[in-house]
Image (cartoon, helix red, strand yellow):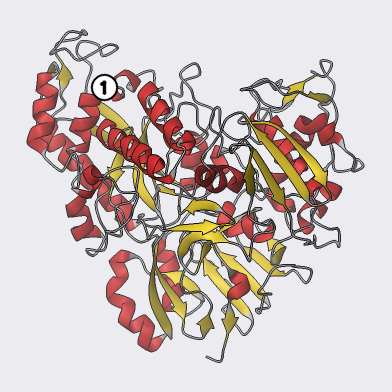
Amino acid sequence: MRLRSWVTPARTLTAVVLGGMLLAACSGGSAHPSASKGVVTFAEAPSSPPNYIMPMASGAFFSYANIPDLSEILFPPLYVFGVNGQPVLNRALSSALPPVFSDGNTTVTVTLKHWQWSDGHPITARDVIFWMNLLSAATDPKAPTIGSSNSPGPGWGGAVPGGFPENVTSYQQTGTYTVVFHLNHSYNPTWFGYNELSQISPIPQAAWDKLSSAGPVGNYDASAESRVSIPGTSPLQYVPADPGTATSGALGVAQFLNLQSQSLGTYATNPLWKVVDGPFKLTQFTTAGFVKMVPNPAYSGSPKPRISAFEELPFASDTAEFNALRSGAVTVGYLPVQDLGQKSFLETQRGYRYNPWYAFGFNYFAYNFTSPTVGPLLQKLYFRQAFQSLVNQPQYIHDFMAGIGTPTVGPVPTFPAHNPYVSPLEAKGEVYPFDPSKAVALLRQNGWTVHPGGVSVCAHPGTSAGDCGSGVAAGQAASLSLLYASGSTVLTNEMETLQSTAKSAAGIQINLSESSSTQITATVFNGCSPSTPCSNWELADWGGPGWTYLLDYLPTGGNLFQTGAGSNAGDYSDPTTDANILATHTAPTYSAEIAALYQYEDYIARQLPVVWMPEGPTQLTMYKSNLSGLVPQGIFNELYPQQYSLGKG
């Protein structure tokens, strides 16, 4: 899961036993209404307005702005995670009872609570089947490409080849409120519960099972395909429509909902989005990112909302947000690190309280391994080692983050100190600490003529020892473009410092350019692959935190680094990584799973599939002193506006 507003941290991780299953935690400055009695306003991250409402989002829309800040408030997942700031299953807010594993962990039974949609219809197993049918259609590689460029439907940012739903050979409704999943392997219940079943969101089949806005609701998701049980394949086999005809079946419904989700101007009026099961329903939405939600009186969970409205406010920059915070116009905002000296003023003169928001994740930015020009260079481990050795994480923390943060070492968060998932290697600190002399040595040892202050070039092309490596041409310059998110002073300072250090120390030229974080994610997660390379970016930082373990609550890395994974920015691919990740999924016991996790994280820490950047709080939250129910803030960046209440103030 990507993006909020600052830099990322990690937080505590524990293990619990639930239901007999071990579950391990795993335009700114525009005027907005001031917070008033009953209305809580929430500052969005700079240049990061929500732009996708359906919970089934592709990688391009797989962001905090869209999932925990919008869709999960309206359409919560089947299983909700996070309790009082702890990374555990939230039984109270989940619409299903804990899953039951049987048949050697190859069969899973899910029983729903008797909750209801806002239109009065019950939430049944049919709504889970509806999600599964659409998810299978949206992610199936056999699906025909019909219609718009978004085919075959919305896609799924949590998709991992061989993972959910491909690892489900069949699923069926066995009762009004019961669904049974048959798996293609015996999986560790911890991993399958926290990283696979966590991807399910019941969606209202009786309202959304349509092929067009004017068309009737039907059972289209269950038609035009034949259900099969072929080990290792999706449970859907498609019967292609005649050329030129509209797509029917689950794929057609998925495509229709995807297009509706991209019609931002209709969110507040579209009948589809009025049928919700979350604590709030949407009443206003602008394309600039202003969101207003009011309580859903039919919400089945507890507690019921106690505020009259929850509003999310867009800002183009952290400076614009701070100006609104300083005026007292935001109930829940964030203090940009460069304005940390204003904390006392906000507390004494504007009635705010301070609470850093920590989440379980880590910070990074991405290489584009498919780039036709620099991809072959980025694929060389020696170059990634040299590049990482030019990233001065301690300096960034000291100079730009007010000393609040820790260096990122690998894919498993190292903060706090007693995180049980941190391997001994990661616990020692950076594997590749800041060392410009090492960067220079690595380049020279691998065929480069280094020009500190200039631009280094490949002097010895070829694949022998001491050569630059396959695909790197004679005379190729060490010149890279780096696209980074606008609006954050911290990120701008980091990027400009890295640019200066890389050139002066090792002759690596970094050409910086800015864009909004939503535009960057749309650029990076846009169907690139080794067979369809992307030439419009080389390195990209959409703003921190880079990743929070959300929808994949156990930090096993499949969503991030497995070949072909939906959130694998830059298409890193390595067979050893794939095998290590698979071992974390199938480990028979908890101790075996921890051992497999250590092996995976140590390998990734050494292989550097991304550029590690310092971790810090998700944001330095400032909230009005008369607001209760906000703290502790969500360990997975989740929001709980149904818990908020406003006193006098």
Residue at 74% over, 55% down: 112
Q: Nearer the viewer, residue 244 or 115?
A: 115
Left or right: residue 588 versus residue 214 is left
Q: Which residue is mark 1?
A: 380
The percent coordinates of residue 199 (x first, y second) are 60, 45
The percent coordinates of residue 301 (x first, y second) are 70, 68
- Kindly indicate the quadrant of the structure image that contains residue 262: top right
The percent coordinates of residue 375 (x first, y second) are 34, 21
Can residue 46 be seen here? The reply is yes
Can residue 636 be seen here? The reply is no
The percent coordinates of residue 421 (x first, y second) are 35, 49
Left or right: residue 53 versus residue 388 is right
- Kindly indicate the quadrant of the structure image that contains residue 557: top left
The kind of secondary structure element at disc 1 is loop
Task: Tell which residue pokes out farthest to the bottom in this image.
Answer: 648
As drawn, 525 above or below 286? above
- Kindly indicate the quadrant of the structure image that contains residue 279: bottom right
Q: Residues within 10 Å of mark 1 (few under 14, many from 20)?
A: some
Q: Amino acid at mark 1?
A: Lys
